[in-house]
Image (cartoon, rainbow, N blue to C red):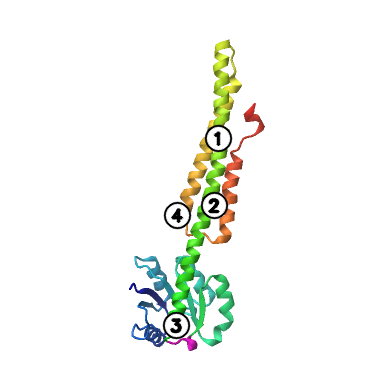
Amino acid sequence: MNATRVLVIEDNPRDVEFLRQALDQRRSAEAFEVTSERLLSTGIHALNGGDRFDVVLLDLNLPDSVGLDTLRRVMAACPTVAVIILSENKHERLALPALRMGADDYLMKSDINGGLFPRAIRYAVERRRMHAQLRRTQQLEVLNQIAGAALHEFNNLIFVVSGNVDLLELSKESGEAHPRRVETIQAALRRMSALTTNIMKFTRDQKSAQPMPYAQLDTALANIQKIIDQNSLDGGLLA
């Protein structure tokens, strides 16, 4: 059985020990591998390191970060990891804002017990995995739409080039000069080159970027459509 890798970012040693005991395999049917950091900076360093964690148990109030900014920085460092906020009762007012920001759960430390706690972690990890799968599916759909729009535009440009090449061949037979045809072909080729460059730049940017939230997928498609529109056919190119 693979152990669930847990990163605890908590500055209170007693709370850390309490969490370790709550996740002790002797008390739970599941195995947990727990790593702890007392500072947000060292916690983020651990997330950015070679170790891969399934879930972060996060105290929002740490020596080097306080409040919702703590959550924001963790999610920015590793958007794919599940995050469960652990808080004192006096900070309960932050529960709803934290969940809206993307936290997977918000638990009062006083409510943690050995039975429900491992289950809450399992559910949070599974939810995050499902969201990641949905996000990948949406990204594939967006890329398919981009590819379809780009291919359509390329077909239009190829039609322009091939049509004007045929007309040039006919012009050669008749001895007529048609510099406008050459200019049209050159313009179409330039647009094809610009479209190719912009599409390649867009795909490189997406590969290097963190996974996009759902709301940004439509924006990404709109941006690439602008690229296509900027390089699309106009009346003059068909002349």
For mark 1, what is the residue? 155
For mark 3, what is the residue? 117
Residue 94, image x, y percentages:
57, 79
At mark 3, the secondary structure is helix
Apparent side of residue 224 relative to residue 80 in the rendered image (left or right): right
At mark 4, the secondary structure is helix
Q: Nearer the viewer, mark 4 or mark 3?
A: 3
Q: Residue at x 44, y 68 (%)?
A: 81
Q: Nearer the viewer, mark 4 or mark 2?
A: 2
Disc assigned to residue 208: 4
Which tag, 4 or 1, sits closer to the chain's start? 1
**Vertical arrangement, residue 138 with respect to residue 92, above or below:** above
Q: Quadrant of residue 178?
A: top right
Asked if the residue under mark 1 is in contact with the one under mark 3, i.e. CB atoms within 8 Å, the reply is no
Which tag, 2 or 3, sits closer to the chain's start? 3
At mark 2, the secondary structure is helix
Q: Residue at x 53, y 31 (%)?
A: 189
Question: In the rendered image, is residue 63 in sight?
Answer: no
For the magenta stretch, what is the residue range? 109-113
Q: Measure how far apart labels 2 and 3 are at the Cα level.
A: 38 Å
Crowd tier of the residue under label 3, counting other residues whose Cα lies within 10 Å: few below 14, some 14–19, many 20 or above: some
Which tag, 3 or 1, sits closer to the chain's start? 3
Question: In the rendered image, is residue 199 in sight?
Answer: yes
For mark 2, what is the residue? 142
Asked if the residue under mark 1 is in contact with the one under mark 4, i.e. CB atoms within 8 Å, the reply is no
Which residue type does callout 4 highlight? Ser
Q: Measure how far apart labels 2 and 1 are at the Cα level.
A: 20 Å
Crowd tier of the residue under label 1, counting other residues whose Cα lies within 10 Å: few below 14, some 14–19, many 20 or above: few
Q: Measure how far apart labels 3 and 1 are at the Cα level.
A: 57 Å
Q: Measure how far apart labels 4 and 2 are at the Cα level.
A: 17 Å
